[in-house]
Image (tube, rainbow, N blue to C red):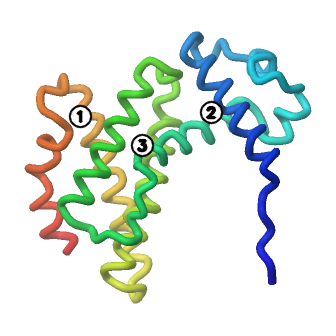
Amino acid sequence: MTQSKTDPRILRTRKLIMDAFIELSGKKEFKEITVKDITTEATINRATFYYHFEDIYDLLEKVLSEVLMINLSGDNFEETDLNEETLIRIFTAITNFQISLSNRCHRGYEDTIARIIREQLEVIFYKLLVKQKGTKETQVLKITAIILSWGMYGASVEWRRNGKEVSPEEYIKSAIPYLLSGVI
């Protein structure tokens, strides 16, 4: 059985649309951006936009997910262990992601952003837990991944709210022994 590859033209067009959206989000609030604005910026037609995305909210979600994955540095967390270094890298990545969004389509879309961050973190933590603990207790590991993802997201929100007096690394480092003693 052969695996089909995505046509490079489709990937380029999708990237073009996403880049146009990111460019526009630096100039306008999300609620002010229209599909017409995006298609004009990307030099494509509406049908092409709708071929790649259901609507502007689908585009927002995909862009945010992709930017978050880039902030997570494309790290292959499946090859690492759930340890202090990994937790610091993950926390730093999500705080950097939130900082990068502070001037772009953030107001009014905190729930969407929060959900995307938590979903991505849940997947990462679940994979790390399965690698470390095995697949015997998958339901328990899923619940643990959910708790870790909400906790990391909540800590990043608190870090931002409290004026960022210390670096993200310093902020999370003090809590890691407590996290790991219950996880490992």
Circle nearer the viewer, 2 or 1: 2
Pick whichever of labels 3 and 2 is earlier in the sequence: 2
The residue carrying mark 3 is: 71
- Secondary structure of the residue carrying tag 1 is helix
**Residue at x 12% of width, y 69% of height:** 181
Q: Position of residue 171 (x, y in %)?
A: 14, 41
Q: Is residue 56 above or below residue 10?
A: above
Q: Residues within 10 Å of mark 1 (few under 14, many from 20)?
A: few
Viewer-closest of 109 and 82: 82
Q: Which residue is mark 1?
A: 158
Nearest the eye: 146 or 94 = 94
Q: Residue at x 44, y 39 (%)?
A: 114
| Location of residue 171 with respect to 28 vertically, above or below | below
* Residue 30 at x, y percent in the picture: 60, 19
Q: Amino acid at mark 1?
A: Glu
Check contact, mark 2 vs mark 1: CB within 8 A: no
Whether residue 150 sits left or right of residue 18 in the image: it is left
| Relative horizontal placement of residue 170, taking residue 161 as reference (left or right) | left
Residue depth check, mark 3 versus mark 1: number of the one nearer the observer: 3
In three-dimensional space, the C-alpha distance between marks 3 and 2, rounded to whole angstroms, equals 16 Å
Tell me the quadrant of the picture where the N terminus can be found: bottom right
- Viewport quadrant of the C terminus: bottom left
Find residue 67 and report its horizontal and vertical position in percent: 51, 39
Which residue, given by chain and number where applicable, does mark 2 sit on? 60
Sequence-first disc among 2 and 1:
2
The disc, 3 or 1, on the residue closer to the chain's N-terminal end is: 3
State the CA–CA distance, disc 3 to disc 1: 19 Å
